[in-house]
Amino acid sequence: MTDLHRLSIRELSSGLHEGKFSSRELTQHYLNRIAKIDAQINSYVTVTPEQALTEADAADAALKSGHAHILAGIPLAHKDIFCTKGIRTSAGSKMLDNFISPYDATIVTKGKNAHLVTLGKVNMDEFAMGSTSENSYYGATKNPWNLDHVPGGSSGGSSAVIAADLAPFATGTDTGGSIRQPASFCGLTGLKPTYGRVSRYGMIAFASSLDQAGPMARSAEDCAYLMNVMAGHDELDSTSVQKPTDDYVANLTQTNVKGLRIGIPKQYFNVEGLNAEVKACVEASLKHLESMGAILVEIDLTMVDSYVPTYYLLGPAEAASNLSRYDGVRYGYRCENPKDLEDLYKRSRSEGFGEEVQRRILIGTYALSAGHADDYYVKAQKVRRLIQQDFLKAFEHVDVIAAPSAPTTAYKIGAKRTPVETYLGDLYTLAANLSGHPAINAPIGFDQQHLPIGLQLIGQYWAESQLLSIVHQYQQTTDWHTQRAAIAEENV
Ligand code: GLN
């Protein structure tokens, strides 16, 4: 069969359970596609064919026994930020180019327990710091819709593998938009759950109070299947919540779009950098939701000018602290022939970390240092609280909040931008991380260059089911999520 990569997760599951094809055939099909196509995209940092085929055989045995998990035998790709026992976990950094974790991240274990088959580890901005995937030690990943453009970041390997049909779904992480923005740039669905919904154990830390893992796939339905595996309390992560999870698949039809109150923050649509085509497309998608019965309500989110400065203080502050563990002694890169301990620390860190990571460590260290902490770190924490309150107030009037996921479509690879210009591109995604709310990207159309555009919906705490359900129903009446880039159409 040459078109297995065109099937949805539900179709893959029933094909495997009905014995129409085996996990080994399906896995081999994806491995063939990766071998043929990935040289053009550079999405996989590590492909693990032998282990994948072994896992596929185990899944086939489970399927034969008649007691297999619904996702048994379906392949997936993990962002290279999740620790995988025995397989390199690089976080896109020279610092961890030689790092092999002695244990699996909880979500990796959960995937294994469900007999999902890991195809490999995919590219990302170094330590998840970036919006383009160009900040990777392994080189830039290309956007399957147009190879001259970025796939977004930091989960750009995850978005690229799905858009090129080199994996049917993938894990991602989102500290300030890294699931939603690459999903937007590649025409996919991606969910950032409420902070605490998914375990962070074994996920390499960037900014611990903002980091959250989530599913990326073509459709909300595909994401719901992966969310069912990923979500849940983990005693190994004290910030994961005890709250019971939903059945995200069963709940796909739960929300009634008729009468749903969608808040439109008026400040978001008057932002200078918002591209006119993106704006028009987002407005058209909202009109579509209105035609399905939703009620559009103009709301105020007054703190919009504070998102970028607040995030770009707190994120780096937490990163500076988290990344202090890479000292050239315990693990990771160590410089050659250090003169003394000081030289070992200095050179290991300046040779092992890339430019953007070093910039964040410097900003974060400055913001935390004695004499500056009150002016920067403490103040940013207070503003963070105000941003959260702004959202809580808005949610007294509406069920969900709509926004663009990004002010533009995918940037050109290598386009010259100052760091601050890049940071401003994160404007629409940062707030949900600062406040902890769940948020989803849905593909809603294309610009004139045929690059995808995304709509973001931000939900109340723990409303993952509702977000997936709204997008699922939108996807029952539109076909943006089924459209494929030319490279994905290539048969192998
Ligand atoms: N682009 C943002 C940053 O560079 C967000 C990254 C992320 O969510 N990991 O920090």
Image (cartoon, rainbow, N blue to C red):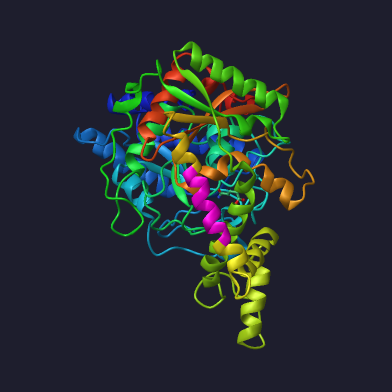
343 in relation to 34, above or below: below
Residue plotted at (53% across, 62% down): 318
Horizontally, is 54 left or right of 335 in the view? left
In the image, taking residue 54 as reference, residue 410 lies left or right, namely right
Residue 172 seen from this side: no
Q: Which residues are magenta?
A: 379-389
Spot the residue most to the top.
291
Picture residue at 47% right of the left edge, 49% below the top: 48
Residue 403, percent from left and from top: 56, 31
Q: Position of residue 433 (x, y in %)?
A: 50, 47
Q: Nearer the viewer, residue 250 or 79?
A: 250
Q: Residue at x 78, y 43 (%)?
A: 415
Q: Is residue 387 magenta?
A: yes
Image point 63% across, 24% down: which residue? 486
Is 156 magenta? The answer is no
**Residue found farthest to the bottom:** 340
**Residue 226 at least partly seen:** yes
Quadrant where the image shows the N terminus: top left
Across and down, in percent, residue 57 comes to 33, 41
Between 374 and 236, which is closer to the camera in this rendering? Answer: 374
Q: Is residue 71 above or below residue 233?
A: above
Q: Main secondary structure of the magenta part?
A: helix
